[in-house]
Amino acid sequence: MMVVDTVAGLMKATEEARSDGRRVGLVPTMGALHPGHLSLLRRSVQDDDTVVATVFVNPLQFAAGEDLASYPRDLRRDLVLADEAGVDYLFVPTCEEMYSQPPLITIGVAALSQRLEGCYRPGHFEGVAMVIAKLFAMVGRCRAYFGEKDYQQLCLVRRLAADLSFPVEVVGCPTVRHPDGLALSSRNVRLSPTERVAAPVIHRALVAGRHAVEAGRCDPAVVSQVMADVMSGEPLADLEYAEAADPGDLRTPDRLAGEVRLLAAARIGAVRLIDNLAAVFGQPRADCEGRSHSQRRPHPEGQLCDGG
Ligand code: PAF
């Protein structure tokens, strides 16, 4: 694996790969790699000829007062994990390399940034859009892999690629979970042992919401209340939102129908966690998310993987 720390180096490496007829895969991360990231890397190693991963904690996507300073960082471990996963180029730019001057041009995200996460993290999606647009411009034609765990981000990145005509195929990959349902997240390392025990309540709330949707509860407010009730049973959890939304534009419809995305965010102590699940109105799922833990598809690291 080659570590690249300049934009010019990244552009040269990906251009050369393509001119040799190689298909390029891109896995953007903020580091502190965990098996969720590794599943994205593995997917790219399997489907592409040259795999580029990035480790950059993007300051633009953290609002004032958020956890930029305490965001977990472990570059030495990331280098080992990325190498073992089969990454060809690991792009690790400094902040000055990514943003050599304060951007004059910004990317507005409009409606998508005004709901769910956007209400709690002002400027977050504009910051994500900026860094991903820059990475897409640097890497050029590629497939880019993003986890469904950050579902609103995945929706945004798909629209970014389409609306700005980047030659990038965006691939959404299933959320990887611990056996107790907690979605893997770099922020999980900051949970105390008691908070770690409490944290799976977010997944339990989403599962309860999914059962309500599958059972034909068509009022989104009722489904939200079902999820909030589960969350309120855990004293360490401070719910921010639990909503049933359209999986495409994330609007809350007047009445639920067809495919629904359930999304939730909560603070467990000082750690803010998000998660989401798919549901189909009036139709109990027959695949892994609806089964007991022992029946769900195991992940190579022993975790469980959502059915998508
Ligand atoms: O999901 C993340 O880790 C980040 O938001 C991303 C996509 C790497 C952009 O900084």
Image (cartoon, rainbow, N blue to C red):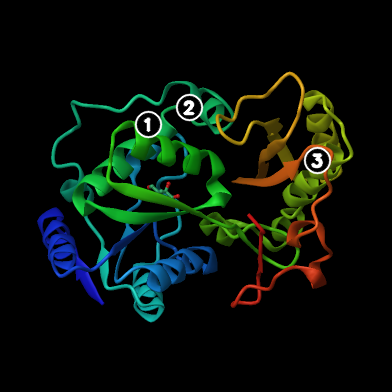
Q: Could you give the CA–CA distance between mark 1 and mark 3, rounded to whole angstroms? A: 29 Å
Q: Which mark is residue 209?
A: 3
Instruction: Write the residue at 34% across / 46% down.
Output: 58
- Give how far across and how far down residue 147 sits, in percent: 51, 54
- Is the N terminus in the top left, top right, bottom left or bottom right quadrant? bottom left
Q: Could you give the CA–CA distance between mark 1 and mark 2, rounded to whole angstroms? A: 8 Å
- Give how far across and how far down residue 138 sits, in percent: 19, 50
- Is the C terminus in the top left, top right, bottom left or bottom right quadrant? bottom right
Instruction: Write the residue at 55% across / 29% down.
Output: 249
Q: Pick the residue in front: 262 or 35.
A: 262
Residue at the extreme bottom of the image, as rendered: 84
- Give how far across and how far down residue 186 sits, in percent: 51, 58
From the image, tell me which residue sits under label 2.
113
Element under disc 2 = helix
Mark 1 vs 2, N-terminal side: 2
- Give how far across and how far down residue 20 sits, in percent: 15, 70
- Mark 2 nearby-residue class (10 Å; few <14, some 14–19, many ≥20): many
Mark 1 touches mark 2? (CB < 8 Å):
yes
- Looking at the image, can residue 291 be seen? yes
Indicate whether 9 appears above or below 257.
below
Instruction: Write the residue at 47% across / 44% down.
Output: 67
Q: Which mark is residue 126?
A: 1
Q: Pick the residue in front: 237 or 40.
A: 40
